[in-house]
Image: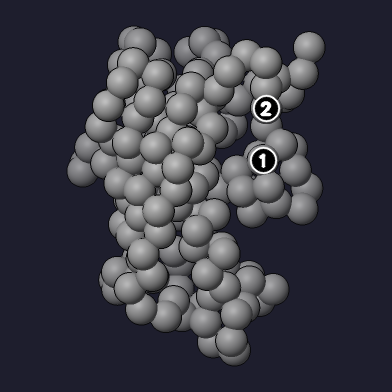
């Protein structure tokens, strides 16, 4: 499976592009990138775990999985609302930025570290400024985790002035 071409995180404004999970400007971060799977009409994040993401030899650290679900959720909400507002990545319009209101993660089985991690999300709006994102994480073809993020439109006071 190929990586994400156009990701919502690529067009976040610089003052809010520092997240350890998905911030493109955080040199030490994971750099998760979320885009559309047009065929399935779902959101998609693909990530290749690195050796330093090991919990027990051969398996991925659960915190990475939780971070993947978290950032996939907020990125999915941003992408969803950006599209709902009539925009696409690259059209010059700044997308809305979301923060995590709540995060629920269910680890279904140990995650082997020799497969791409694939997060697939389904977004539902529950309030004009809150979105629920349900995510399934696969390692190869095996479902290893699932979760839910309640993503909240980021207050303007969060951004640097």
Q: Residue at x 40, y 19 (%)?
A: 129
Please tell me which residue lies in front, 146 or 80: 146
Q: Which residue is drawn at 45% across and 42% down?
A: 102
Quadrant (top left/top right/bottom left/bottom right) for the N terminus? bottom left
Quadrant (top left/top right/bottom left/bottom right) for the C terminus? top right
Q: Residue at x 54, y 75 (%)?
A: 60
Q: Position of residue 138 (x, y in %)?
A: 35, 65
Residue on which disc 2 sits: 16
Give the number of the disc on residue 19: 1
Q: Classify 99 as above or below 144.
A: above
Q: Residues within 10 Å of mark 1 (few under 14, many from 20)?
A: some
Q: Where is residue 114 in the image (x, y as percent from the top left)?
A: 50, 79
Give the number of the disc on residue 125: none
Q: Position of residue 97 (x, y in %)?
A: 54, 24
Cα distance in 3D space between marks 2 and 1: 7 Å
Q: Tell me which corner region of the image, top left, top right, bottom left or bottom right, holds residue 24.
A: top right
Q: Classify 45 as above or below 64.
A: above
**110 relative to 29 in the view: left or right:** left
Q: How crowded is mark 2: few (under 14 residues within 10 Å), some or many (20 or more)?
A: some
Q: Classify 39 as above or below 106.
A: above
- Mark 2 lies on a secondary structure that is helix
Give the number of callouts.
Answer: 2
Q: Residue at x 77, y 18 (%)?
A: 160
Residue 4 appears in view:
no
Q: Where is residue 143 in the image (x, y as percent from the top left)?
A: 29, 69
């Amino acid at each position: 499976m190929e990586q994400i071409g156009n990701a919502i995180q690529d067009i976040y404004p610089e003052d809010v592009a520092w997240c350890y999970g998905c911030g493109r400007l955080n040199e030490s971060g994971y750099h998760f990138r979320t885009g559309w799977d047009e065929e399935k009409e779902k959101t998609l994040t693909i990530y290749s775990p690195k050796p330093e993401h090991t919990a027990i030899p051969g398996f991925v650290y659960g915190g990475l999985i939780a971070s993947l679900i978290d950032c996939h959720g907020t990125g999915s909400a941003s992408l969803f609302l950006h599209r709902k507002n009539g925009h696409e990545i690259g059209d010059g319009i700044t997308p809305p930025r979301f923060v995590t209101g709540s995060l629920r993660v269910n680890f279904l089985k140990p995650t082997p570290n020799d497969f791409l991690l694939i997060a697939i999300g389904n977004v539902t709006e529950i309030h004009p400024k809150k979105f629920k994102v349900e995510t399934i994480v696969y390692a190869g073809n095996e479902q290893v985790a699932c979760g839910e993020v309640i993503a909240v439109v980021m207050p303007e006071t969060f951004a640097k002035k």
